[in-house]
Amino acid sequence: MTDSGMNPGTPDRRSAGRYLWWLAASQRHRVAVGALLGSLWMVGLTLPPYVLSRAIDDGLRADRTGALVGWAAALLGVGVLNAWLAIMRHRTMTRVRMDAAFRTVRVVALQTARLGAALPRRMTAGEIVTIGMGDVQTISQTLTITGPGVGAVLSYIVVAALLLSVSWLLAVVVLLGVPLLAVVLGPLLERLQGRESAYREHQGALTARFVDLAGGLRVLNGLGGKEVFAERYRQGSRALQAEGYRVGSVTSWIQALGLGLPTLFLAAVTWLAARMAAQGTISVGELVAVYGYVAVLVVPVAFFIEGGYDLSRGLVAARRVIRLLDLEPDLAGSGAAVDAPGPPSALRDPESGVEIAPGKLTALAGARPSETAAVVDRLGRFAESAATWGGVRLGDVDLTHVRERIMVADNEADLFSGTLREVVAGRADPAALDGSGADARPGEPDRGAGPGESDRGAGLGESDRGAGPRVSGSGAVGRALRAAAAQDIVLGLPKGLDSHIDAQGRNLSGGQRQRVRLARALLADPEVLLAVEPTSAVDAHTEAAMADGLRAFRAGRTTVVTGSSPLLLDRADTVYYLEDGRVAAVGGHRELLRESTGYRALVARGAGGPTAPAGSPAPDGDSRTAPDRGSSDTRSQEAAR
């Protein structure tokens, strides 16, 4: 694909057919060349029968060796020319299909990034995977009709004209026979669209179930529900198989008729021409030519059928792409967005009563972590609310400015594959950062995933949402890693910062993944950082180091953390204690311990005291499972912008 890799253009979303036309119109020159080469190749296929008939009548029957040699040489030249045209046609059409595929991939990727947090609530992961891996290929294959499809029409007209020069009866048979094939296959192609649509829907749903099953396998093992979900997947697989058989049934009839009907058509025309030759109406050479013309006609007829089949499937795939492109992101803001307030500015959430003072470290604690996470969603503008920023309604501020200055660092943020340096650097250019970390002071070694290891870090979580990195100075990556108590991760990897990290950090423990996420958020250095449960999967020693590093690294900048650990809460300038989603008490950590019974009980559980629930700190692991924050469907998800 050419420059469409950078700018795919604006797709036509009015209908599936218009979208396919947009893909073709976006590469007019290449499509025109493909149509020209396809037409020349198809028409060129009709020349050998004519040349062969002349060689028979003018050479063999007339016993003229010179004419025979001349026509034989012409036949060789036509064959070589057709071979070259076929090669160039195939190369050109491959480029047309690749451009369409990559253009669609680019459009889908841009829309996915644009939707951000709205995407998982509007469309399942299975549907997105099906679009990216199946529908894109189907759509690209449809564009084949712009090359050989056009050539098939022209060659059909040429063959009819050649037959008309031999016999009007043969020409009429051909002109009427090919449309008859279309009439026979039309209802089957229409039926195929319905079957294909149902199959694609089932496929997307089953893929989504598989993604959920694979992502939550460890949790299912712990709950003893693996077999239950596996049986559900098997049932869905059997239903998809049955739907696939229905699609295959229609497809088999189309392919059988696509091969059989042209062959019967060839036999009928050949039989008629043979009778005419026996009666002396046409010559032997003309009989050979008629056979050749009709045999050549099988190729465009086959392309008619194949093109109709591809177009039917392509329309189904294009409808799914359009459905994705028609989705709109949440909280896109009005056209008359107001300017963002100048820093420093306070954030206020009227629904809970939380007010975040600029330049301070504020902690949110509650018995239900989902309630504190909901406050973060509102303050980060990932949910509709009346939250204000510097006295301005947050929902009225241009969303781009909000994302540039306010970051929500979720505890389940995605970790993309790459070197550790690249993973931590995020959007910044890793080559511009001196992140050697050679001066890192080793901290408490991470002891791996113990029995209480949090599974949440390995799931299909969210990317750090919002502000892009603003880094300067040498050793920025190293300083961020030290602040997140993650320098021992660098020392423990074979190539340090240049060691490869698998997608979702699968080659890291839960505690390591959490510290890498925190380091990435710190390195981004947003004006406002909202961190959800940043220390929930590490042991007490590491948590204390992370809390100290976070406070020091973010000194003078607005920072909000959620959690119930006293090690984290003790570092905060202000702690908000929430009950039922509302502020029940506010003050310093030690002040709340003295004055709030509910807060004191919450902190006792967070410290792993006698009232601590199952899943609190494991005595010999580095992980501590945080309380359930509720269904991930209630959480926002924004791709790293």
Image (cartoon, rainbow, N blue to C red):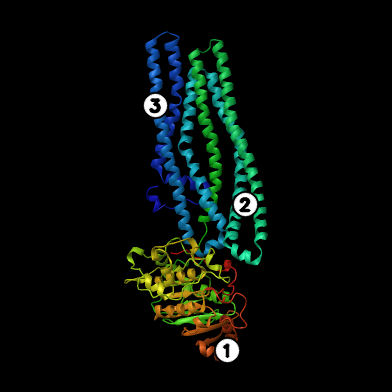
Q: Which of 297 and 561 is in front in this view?
A: 561
- Give, as a three-letter code, the residue at label 2: His
Neighbor class of circle 3 (other Cα within 10 Å; few <14, some 14-19, many 20+) is: few
User: What residue sits right under mark 3 in the picture?
Assistant: 80
Residue 328 left/right relative to 432: right
Point 60% across, 29% down: residue = 260
Task: Examine the rendered structure and indicate whether residue 206 appears above or below residue 81.
Answer: below
Neighbor class of circle 2 (other Cα within 10 Å; few <14, some 14-19, many 20+) is: many
Q: Which of 426 and 111 is in front in this view?
A: 426
Instruction: Tell me if residue 14 can be seen.
Output: no
User: What residue sits right under mark 1 in the picture?
Assistant: 596
For mark 2, give the secondary structure: helix
Q: Kindly check if marks 1 and 2 are in contact, taking CB atoms under 8 A apart as contact.
A: no
Among numbered discs 3 and 2, the one appearing first in the sequence: 3
Q: Which of 226 and 28 is in front in this view?
A: 226
Among numbered discs 1 and 3, the one appearing first in the sequence: 3
Q: In which quarter of the image is residue 525?
A: bottom left
User: What residue sits right under mark 2 in the picture?
Assistant: 202
For mark 1, give the secondary structure: loop
